[in-house]
């Protein structure tokens, strides 16, 4: 396998690159720098791989040129390998449009003014990790906004209101019927599933809640969701009524920490890196390979999740995902157990969190 390598480091706003070539002929990787962003391009067919050290482990990140990478605060080695090497894992389309305009006004959450070094919400008030898609397509059918705002935040809000752990499907807000309802509200075409705005779910939830997961089961199939919920309105459970949502900027970690320290969770949208799908809890925190994941049309992949804690010692946010309990890591940061069914969470590095986040995080006072 013929490989040529490129190593880059970012210190502050200064990018210092080193290009290392092996063999004859010109180096196949061309690097250009704009501010703190590195752009790698190459000619011909090949796979771009990345590694934290020159000895590996090497992870495939892209097959198409060029690629734009975020490298602030990290060192990475890059190489292009000849055809026949491993193909990069495809990042699913989770359904959120990162260019979508969300509503609401930014504001500063209440005290404590100086958040403690770490905090998590009352974990007993969270629903268990859900799965929005299949193992073959974790993003299907693009319902991540429903999972984070409704299954995650609305369930948590209802449990927090009565201080009772949600232990079964009658106490979990369903992301199924409300997903179709929001698609109709946003005037999406019938029998199709696309991205939806987080604030559209708050609009529906404010009108009396939504059915429980026991009354409105979720299936990871767009046609089946429309068949089950497109032509009828199920009675909502008023326990899941959510009103008066607020939002803070993800650029202000202090504000997010204040919400979490006061016991609130936050739903938010984010871009992803191409190694997201293969993350299984190590390393902690998750930093990512710096290569933004893109959809087939070239747009950035968007996803929605629930922020449930932070730790300044780890320098990371704790986030609950909706890709099942066999993805990611554990709440404690320890490796998943042998069965891998105690995972579904990620400690995400603060810098990575802020670089990928769409810009807004929503909570209920």
Image: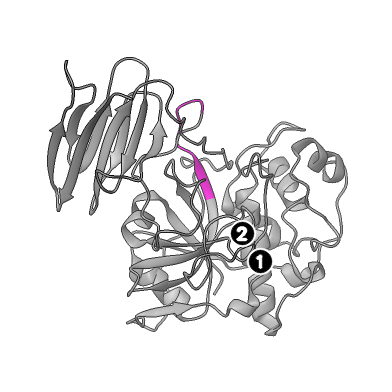
Where does the N terminus fall, quadrant-wise?
Answer: top left
Residue at position x 56%, y 38% from top? 93
Q: Secondary structure at mark 1?
A: helix
Real-space CA distance between mark 2 and mark 1, rounded to the nearest whole angstrom? 6 Å
Residue 301 part of the magenta-drawn span: yes
Q: Secondary structure at mark 2?
A: helix
Tag 1 residue: 154
Residue at position x 52%, y 38% from top? 91
In which image quadrant can residue 214 be found? bottom right
Instruction: Give 303 or 114, whichever is nearer the viewer.
Output: 303
- Which stretch appears magenta? 296-303
Residue at position x 64%, y 62% from top? 341
Q: Residues within 10 Å of mark 2 (few under 14, many from 20)?
A: many
Q: Is residue 33 left or right of 198 when viewed as pictured? A: left
Vertically, is 317 above or below 140?
below
Are the residues flagged by discs 2 and 1 in contact, CB closer than 8 Å?
A: yes
Instruction: Give 109 or 301, whichever is nearer the viewer.
Output: 301
Image location (x, y in percent) of residue 195: 60, 40
Image location (x, y in percent) of residue 307: 50, 65
Residue at position x 74%, y 47% from top? 181
Our reading of the magenta stretch's main secondary structure is loop
The structure's colour scheme is: one colour
Image location (x, y in percent) of residue 79: 28, 32
Tag 2 residue: 149
> Could one spot residue 108 in this view of the protein?
no
């Amino acid at each position: 396998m013929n490989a040529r390598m490129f190593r880059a480091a970012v210190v502050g706003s200064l990018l210092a690159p080193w290009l290392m070539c092996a063999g004859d002929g010109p180096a196949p990787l061309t690097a250009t720098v704009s501010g703190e962003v590195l752009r790698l391009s190459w000619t011909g067919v090949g796979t771009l791989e990345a590694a934290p050290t020159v000895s590996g482990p090497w992870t495939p990140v892209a097959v198409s040129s060029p690629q734009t990478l975020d490298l602030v605060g990290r060192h990475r080695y890059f190489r292009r390998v000849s055809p026949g090497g491993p193909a990069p894992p495809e990042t699913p389309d989770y359904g959120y449009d990162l260019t979508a305009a969300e509503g609401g006004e930014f504001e500063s959450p209440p005290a404590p003014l100086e958040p403690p070094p770490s905090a998590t919400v009352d974990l007993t008030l969270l629903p268990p990790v859900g799965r929005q898609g299949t193992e073959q397509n974790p993003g299907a059918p693009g319902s991540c906004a429903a999972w984070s705002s409704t299954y995650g935040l609305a369930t948590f809000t209802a449990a927090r209101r009565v201080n009772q752990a949600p232990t079964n499907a009658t106490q979990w807000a369903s992301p199924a019927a409300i997903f179709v309802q929001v698609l109709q509200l946003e005037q999406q075409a019938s029998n199709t599933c696309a991205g939806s705005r987080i604030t559209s779910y708050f609009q529906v939830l404010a009108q009396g809640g939504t059915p429980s997961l026991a009354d409105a089961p979720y299936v990871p199939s767009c046609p089946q969701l429309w068949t089950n919920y497109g032509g009828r309105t199920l009675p909502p459970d008023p326990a899941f009524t959510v009103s008066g949502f607020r939002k803070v900027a993800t650029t202000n970690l202090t504000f997010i920490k204040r919400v979490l320290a006061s016991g609130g969770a936050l739903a938010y949208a984010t871009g992803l890196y191409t190694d997201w799908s293969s993350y299984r809890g190590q390393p902690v925190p998750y930093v990512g390979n710096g290569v933004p994941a893109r959809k087939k049309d070239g747009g950035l992949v968007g996803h929605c999740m629930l922020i449930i804690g932070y730790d300044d010692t780890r320098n990371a946010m704790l986030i609950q995902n909706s890709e099942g309990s066999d993805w990611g890591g554990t709440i404690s940061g320890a490796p998943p157990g042998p069965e891998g069914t105690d995972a579904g969470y990620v400690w995400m590095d603060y810098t990575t969190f802020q670089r990928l986040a769409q810009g807004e995080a929503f909570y209920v006072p």
